[in-house]
């Protein structure tokens, strides 16, 4: 058990580093598209260290204080509950703790924490952001659920390892090719989940500074920041397991998650922003219709 | 025993002596009057008592003047006429007392003479066995009533009297004509003699049918049947209520007995059809026409007419309906109870209407709260009239429904629809009366007669219940339990001198029953589905009643008695062993909870009641479809012995769906939850709605397998559950009242339970039962917290709150845990229910239902966050800076429940071990999942380790906290308004608190889904019905000519259908 915890710690640290790196790469790509030089790809590491070295942290109340812990916990939880490498007892982490349904609900844990902390700050913009986030969540979860349920019924399991196992045996066994419509719906939902650009109203930098963490600074912000990075990696791994056939070694995992990351970065940089209700309506129409094609195919089978 | 003829003679002499010796003064007149009435009453009572104790075995025959019948006139007093005589004289005495206490307009002696003549006439009518003599007595009665009706000497009563004279004369003419022709036909006037000479073959094509119809038609006019009853309504509206009380409470019943007896003696073969046509139409039409009444007396008048219609129907079935054995007995008791119920309650209502004096219903606003005794009498009478258990009207209706043969199911359906209409208008009236309004209330006259009436009514109700349980052979346990419920709630009322005493008593009683259930295994032999719900009810109730004390100061004295009543009737539901007992306790629960909700929102309570009535009577109709066999009571298991139509299942399920708040039967829920007393709402949501779940399980397990289309029904139910879960969650997002958010959330959550039930697999039941308990825990917690917050802040309006975390840290902690559970986020207990349900749905491949259910839970996050944010987070207002933490009992309950969610979240077996036993008692071999070591649960599709998740979450949280303290920064607390707000310093909390319409953007996306389509449809139906009724009730033009015309038309109609050979 103890070695598991040790590995879990390593995975968390690795996940954090990977997440921060991805963030840096994203900033770099964005800058290049804008025609700027942009920061170094390690900028996020620098930011994190800077935040951790601040001398005071401002607190607005108990929930405000606890929220970053919730956020970090939520991120780490998701990363650790999803098996990274198929067949590896170490890198499947704590996936014995629960199946896909557990992960789906545990994902909310961190978001809830962050939303509550933001609300406790007393800043109206911080409270506004979670309401947008939750509304948008109701948007993207519908196509996402369609693809998840479709896959679960098709493969007769909701265990993530089970789903990965069902996709082994060549690239055409991936759900992306077995159930292309479900995968497209799921990947569009992913854009919403990452608040990638057409769906970025939650953070809306020009309008409500940075959304929920408006009031956060210093150590608090560093926790939120790390939590978010780890959460991001966890979700990449999840989507990789769901649609891209999982990974049998770490290199494959890096490649596949990086591919997913690139999808998001490229989409983000070419779109303007939807308003909340537009985003919700979008999610409830196009990806749903696309997803339902496979969904109904599985339903009648 | 007194010779019946003495009664008539004495009354006659007294009447004349009052007329002659009235110069001796008021005291003499009153003395003679009272002596006579008391003597008569005592005399008839002695006869009735003789019959009751079986001291008198055979009917009494009195030959007048020594001539034996058929030559001489004779009186014939049997059991029924003696009982009816008692009722007539009792009501007569009460009415006279009432009238005298208010003062008689007319010269008093004249009025008293007429009263005596009226009583005399009706007694004679009941007792005589001679057709001509009957006519004479009818004339005496009628003429006395003409005078009495006019006695107010105002335009209303004079007009009514004139109409009565004309129509009454027409009626008497027919009776006389009938009697004369009968004499020519049979050569005799003695009823028994004629009966001996008649056989039914004489009815084919002879004079006899015309004669009988003439005779009975005359009586039918007096019985106020539709469409010949406009005059009667004018009397009810116009005459002195004291007179109306006698007429409606006594005299008309005399006519009724005479009608039935004549038809019986005449061996009239078409009585059943006449009864169905006229009885049913009268009943239905008057129940609907009453909706639009603004005059309280006319409203009671419609109700009286309706009851008469029901009586005619019942009588026709009794005499001519081919009933045998139990059915015949039930029908007899139905008739007796209908008569008694109507006599005592309706006369009380008329007395009270007279005492208060106001006619228009709006003027009655607030009466209930202004005078407690008046309110009690009024409530009791109305409840009994509308057929609320455990009052007499309920037993009458139940006997009636049980007795009607199954092939006349349409009559059952129509009568129940009429009963719903009756509840609708009676309790619309009750709603107005029970509204709060200040001002003084006084009435003129004595309340004693009403008091007497109601006491008799209560006694009769107890008798009715006793008779019902004895006759139907239902398990006596249930009967005893009913008595126990009533006695204990009355005890709470009587012994509870203060709210504290009531609180302690209620706690003690619920606790004692709980102790008894645990100790005494005879009530629940082995742990099964029933004991599961008994424990659920008692555990929930004891917690919620514990929490009510701080809130109870503003509640009325009936709050705790009704609370105990509701709780115990739910226990009754859980232990009932057949459908009828289930129905009885179900109705007890519905009505008592209605009265509790009525302590808060009146209109909400009314809608709740009407929906409950639709459900409850739907259930009764369904039970009726099930019942066959000799004693007509379908037990749970015996329903498997025969094939029944799918409608039985659907109808029975309606009741449960209403209580579960399943769309589209949910329209009561928002307001009933939102406006009921805060101390009661936790019970309503946590426990009462679960009774629907219990009933649902019974129906699905015992009944549905034997119905056709059962798979379709189950799939349909699952869809209803899923759509309810989704749409109610959507609606919850946009509510701005804390209790209304929780209300929608409640019915949305119960939607999940319904899906679990509809799956009808063991895993589905596991999910449903687990969620049942879990919902009790977290929704109880949330409602208790909401009650406390409303108590402390004085508002339930969410935008008014905010920042309360600083004032109520414990409540916040509990509330947060409740919300996490509600949202179904691991590691608290909410997730297990979701996981079980989804696994069950995956197993069954109900993909679309699964999609909707999961999606609904995502939607639910929105209102979860809204509640936490708008109540506890954001900016604290200045006015709440001194607000305290909730009162201790509430905090205790909250924290206990919060602890439970945590404990169950880590070890789901705390609930699952119970639900597993309950499921096995239903005949399943496994609960549908495997519970492995270390709390790992495995289904066919997935797995989940509750204990690990709990340890993992708590552990990582602690690690995160430790890491935080290793960081360098010092934490500095800043003020509430110190926020980075565009370089500006906000000056008031209100200006920066975001609390109103949190999801305006979402509203724009889902506008079409949250438009109140269902509610508007109900409103549209109600309004169109109202408009229709308002238009059709003009049928009663108030014009004597049309009234007379309708008499002619009706007679022609009877002869026409006779000619056409419909009979």
Image: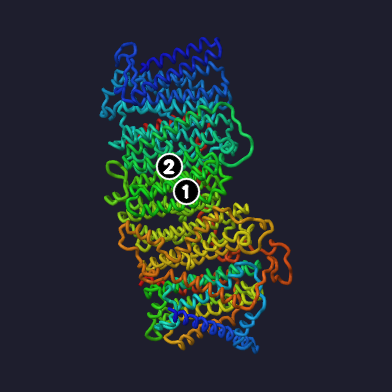
Q: In the rendered image, is residue B1030 in sight?
A: no
Residue B358 image point, x, y percent: 59, 32
In the displayed structure, does residue A269 sit left or right of residue B614?
A: right
- Please tell me which residue lies in front, B997 or B690: B690
Q: Nearer the viewer, mark 1 or mark 2?
A: 2
Q: How is the image coloured?
A: rainbow
Q: Which residue is mark 2?
A: B485
Q: In the rendered image, is residue B1026 in sight?
A: yes
Bin the neighbour count of mark 1 within 10 Å (Cα to Cα): few under 14, some 14-19, many 20 and up: many
Q: Secondary structure at mark 2?
A: helix
Mark positioned earlier in the residue sequence (1 or 2)? 2
Residue B335 image point, x, y percent: 37, 33
- The Cα atoms of the two marked residues, 1 and 2, are separated by 24 Å
In the displayed structure, does residue A185 sit left or right of residue A26?
A: left
Q: Residue at x 30, y 50 (%)?
A: B639
Which image quarter is the N terminus of chain B in?
top left
Which image quarter is the C terminus of chain B in?
top left
Residue B1040 image point, x, y percent: 51, 28
Q: Is residue B428 above or below residue A11?
A: above
Tag 1–tag 2 contact (CB < 8 Å): no
Q: Is residue B474 above or below residue B777?
A: above
Q: Chain of mark 2?
A: B
- Please tell me which residue lies in front, A20 or B128: A20
- Specify the quadrant of the image occupied by residue B176: top left
Q: Is residue A193 above or below residue B468?
A: below
Number of the label disc, if any, that sits on residue B611: 1
Residue B959 image point, x, y percent: 53, 75
């Amino acid at each position: 058990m103890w070695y598991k915890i040790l590995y879990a710690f390593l995975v968390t640290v690795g996940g954090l580093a990977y997440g921060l790196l991805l963030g840096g790469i994203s900033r770099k790509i964005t800058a290049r598209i804008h025609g700027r030089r942009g920061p170094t790809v390690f900028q996020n590491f620098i930011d994190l260290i800077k935040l951790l070295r601040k001398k005071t942290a401002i607190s607005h109340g108990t929930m405000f204080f606890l929220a970053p812990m919730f956020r970090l916990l939520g991120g780490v939880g998701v990363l650790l509950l999803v098996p990274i490498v198929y067949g590896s007892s170490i890198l499947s982490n704590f996936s014995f703790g629960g199946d896909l349904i557990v992960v789906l609900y545990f994902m909310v844990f961190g978001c809830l924490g962050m939303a509550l902390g933001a609300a406790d700050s007393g800043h109206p913009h911080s409270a506004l952001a979670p309401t947008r986030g939750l509304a948008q969540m109701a948007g993207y979860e519908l196509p996402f659920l369609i693809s998840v349920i479709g896959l679960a019924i098709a493969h007769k399991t909701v265990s993530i390892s089970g789903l990965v196992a069902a996709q082994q045996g060549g690239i055409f066994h991936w759900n992306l090719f077995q159930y292309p419509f479900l995968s497209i719906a799921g990947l569009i939902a992913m854009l919403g989940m990452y608040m990638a650009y057409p769906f970025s109203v939650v953070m809306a930098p020009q309008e409500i500074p940075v959304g929920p963490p408006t009031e956060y600074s210093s150590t608090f912000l560093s926790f939120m920041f790390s939590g978010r990075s780890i959460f991001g990696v966890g979700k990449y791994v999840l989507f990789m397991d769901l649609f891209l056939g999982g990974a049998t070694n770490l290199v494959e995992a890096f490649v596949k998650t990086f591919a997913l990351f690139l999808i998001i970065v490229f989409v983000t940089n070419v779109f303007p922003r939807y308003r909340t209700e537009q985003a919700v309506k979008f999610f409830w129409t196009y990806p749903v219709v696309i997803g339902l094609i496979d969904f109904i195919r599985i339903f009648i089978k | 025993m007194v010779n019946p003829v003495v009664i008539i003679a004495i009354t006659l002499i007294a009447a004349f002596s009052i007329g002659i010796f009235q110069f001796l003064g008021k005291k003499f007149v009153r003395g003679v009057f009272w002596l006579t009435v008391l003597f008569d009453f005592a005399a008839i009572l002695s006869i009735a008592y003789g019959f009751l104790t079986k001291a008198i075995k055979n009917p009494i025959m009195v030959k007048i003047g020594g001539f034996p019948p058929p030559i001489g006139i004779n009186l014939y007093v049997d059991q029924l006429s003696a009982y009816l005589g008692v009722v007539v004289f009792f009501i007569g005495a009460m009415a006279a007392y009432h009238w005298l206490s208010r003062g008689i307009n007319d010269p008093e002696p004249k009025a008293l003479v007429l009263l005596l003549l009226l009583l005399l006439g009706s007694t004679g009518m009941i007792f005589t066995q001679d057709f001509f003599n009957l006519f004479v007595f009818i004339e005496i009665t009628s003429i006395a009533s003409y005078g009495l009706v006019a006695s107010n000497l105002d335009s209303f009563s004079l007009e009514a009297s004139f109409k009565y004279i004309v129509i009454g004369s027409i009626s008497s003419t027919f009776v006389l004509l009938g009697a004369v022709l009968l004499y020519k036909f049979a050569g005799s006037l003695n009823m028994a003699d004629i009966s001996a000479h008649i056989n039914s073959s004489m009815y084919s094509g002879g004079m006899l049918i015309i004669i009988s119809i003439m005779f009975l038609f005359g009586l039918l006019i007096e019985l106020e049947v539709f469409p010949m009853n406009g005059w009667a309504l004018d009397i009810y509206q116009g005459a002195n209520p004291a007179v109306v009380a006698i007429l409606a409470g006594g005299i008309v019943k005399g006519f009724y007995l005479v009608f039935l007896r004549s038809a019986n003696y005449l061996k009239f073969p078409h009585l059943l059809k006449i009864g169905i046509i006229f009885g049913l139409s009268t009943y239905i039409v008057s129940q609907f026409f009453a909706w639009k009444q603004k005059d309280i007396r006319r409203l009671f008048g419609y109700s009286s007419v309706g009851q008469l219609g029901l009586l005619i129907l019942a009588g026709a079935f009794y005499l001519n309906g081919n009933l045998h054995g139990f059915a015949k007995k039930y029908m007899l008791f139905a008739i007796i109870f209908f008569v008694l119920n109507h006599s005592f309650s309706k006369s009380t209502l008329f007395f009270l209407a007279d005492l208060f004096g106001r006619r228009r219903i709006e003027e009655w606003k607030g009466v209930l709260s202004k005078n407690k005794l008046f309110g009690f009498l009024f409530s009791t009478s109305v409840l009994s009239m509308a057929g609320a258990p455990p009052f007499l009207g309920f037993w009458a209706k139940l006997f009636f429904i049980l007795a009607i043969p199954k092939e006349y199911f349409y009559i059952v359906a129509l009568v129940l629809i009429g009963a719903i209409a009756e509840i609708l208008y009676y309790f619309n009236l009750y709603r107005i009366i029970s509204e709060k309004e200040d001002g003084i209330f006084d009435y003129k006259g004595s309340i004693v007669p009403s008091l007497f009436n109601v006491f008799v009514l209560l006694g009769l109700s107890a008798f009715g219940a006793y008779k019902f349980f004895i006759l139907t052979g239902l398990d006596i346990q249930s009967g005893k339990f009913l008595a126990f419920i009533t006695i204990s709630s009355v005890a709470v009322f009587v012994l509870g001198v203060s709210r504290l005493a009531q609180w302690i008593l209620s706690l003690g009683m619920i606790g004692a029953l709980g102790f008894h259930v645990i100790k005494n295994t005879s009530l629940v032999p082995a742990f099964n589905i029933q004991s599961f719900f008994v424990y659920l009810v008692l555990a929930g109730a004891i917690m919620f009643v514990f929490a009510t004390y701080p809130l109870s100061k503003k509640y009325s004295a009936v709050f705790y008695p009704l609370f105990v009543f509701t709780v115990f009737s739910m226990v009754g539901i859980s232990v009932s062993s057949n459908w009828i007992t289930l129905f009885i306790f179900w109705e007890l629960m519905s009505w008592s909870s209605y009265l509790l909700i009525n302590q808060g929102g009146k209109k909400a309570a009314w809608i709740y009641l009407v929906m409950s009535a639709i459900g409850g009577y739907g259930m009764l109709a369904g039970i009726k479809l099930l019942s066959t066999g000799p004693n007509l009571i379908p037990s749970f298991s015996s329903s498997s012995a025969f094939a029944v139509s799918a409608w039985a299942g659907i109808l029975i399920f309606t009741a449960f769906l209403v209580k579960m708040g399943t769309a589209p039967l949910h329209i009561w829920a928002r307001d009933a939850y939102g406006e009921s007393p805060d101390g009661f709402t936790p019970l309503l949501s946590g426990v009462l709605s679960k009774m629907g779940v219990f009933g649902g399980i019974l129906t699905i397990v015992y009944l549905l397998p034997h119905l056709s289309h059962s798979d379709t029904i189950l799939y349909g139910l699952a869809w209803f559950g899923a759509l309810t879960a989704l749409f109610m969650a959507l609606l919850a997002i946009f509510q701005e009242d804390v209790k209304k958010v929780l209300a929608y959330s409640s019915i949305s959550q119960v939607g999940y339970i319904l899906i679990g039930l509809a799956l009808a697999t063991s895993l589905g039941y596991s999910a449903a039962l687990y969620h049942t308990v879990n919902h009790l825990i977290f929704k109880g917690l949330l409602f208790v917290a909401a009650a406390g917050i409303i108590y402390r802040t004085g508002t339930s309006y969410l935008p008014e709150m905010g920042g309360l975390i600083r004032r109520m840290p414990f409540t916040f902690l509990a509330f947060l845990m409740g919300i996490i559970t509600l949202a179904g986020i691991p590691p608290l207990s909410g997730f297990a229910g979701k996981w079980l349900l989804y696994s069950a749905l995956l197993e069954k491949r109900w993909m679309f239902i699964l999609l909707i259910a999961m999606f609904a839970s995502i939607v639910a996050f929105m209102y979860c966050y809204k509640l936490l944010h708008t109540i506890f987070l954001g900016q604290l207002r200045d006015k709440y800076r001194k607000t305290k933490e909730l009162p201790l009992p509430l905090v205790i309950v909250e924290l206990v429940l919060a602890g439970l969610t945590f404990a169950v979240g880590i070890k789901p077996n705390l609930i699952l071990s119970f639900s597993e036993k309950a499921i096995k008692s239903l005949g399943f071999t496994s609960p549908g999942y495997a519970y492995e070591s270390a709390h790992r649960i495995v289904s066919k599709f997935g797995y989940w380790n509750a204990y690990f998740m709990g340890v993992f979450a708590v552990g990582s949280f602690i690690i995160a906290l430790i890491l935080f303290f290793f960081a360098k920064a010092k934490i500095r607390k800043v003020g509430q308004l110190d926020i980075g707000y565009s370089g500006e310093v906000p000056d008031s909390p209100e200006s920066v608190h975001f609390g109103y319409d949190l999801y305006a953007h979402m509203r724009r996306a889902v506008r079409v889904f949250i438009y109140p389509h269902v509610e508007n449809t109900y409103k549209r139906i109600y309004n169109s019905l109202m408009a229709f009724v308002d238009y059709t009730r003009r049928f009663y033009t108030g014009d004597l000519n049309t009234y007379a015309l309708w008499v002619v038309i009706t007679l022609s109609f009877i002869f026409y259908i006779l000619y056409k050979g419909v009979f």
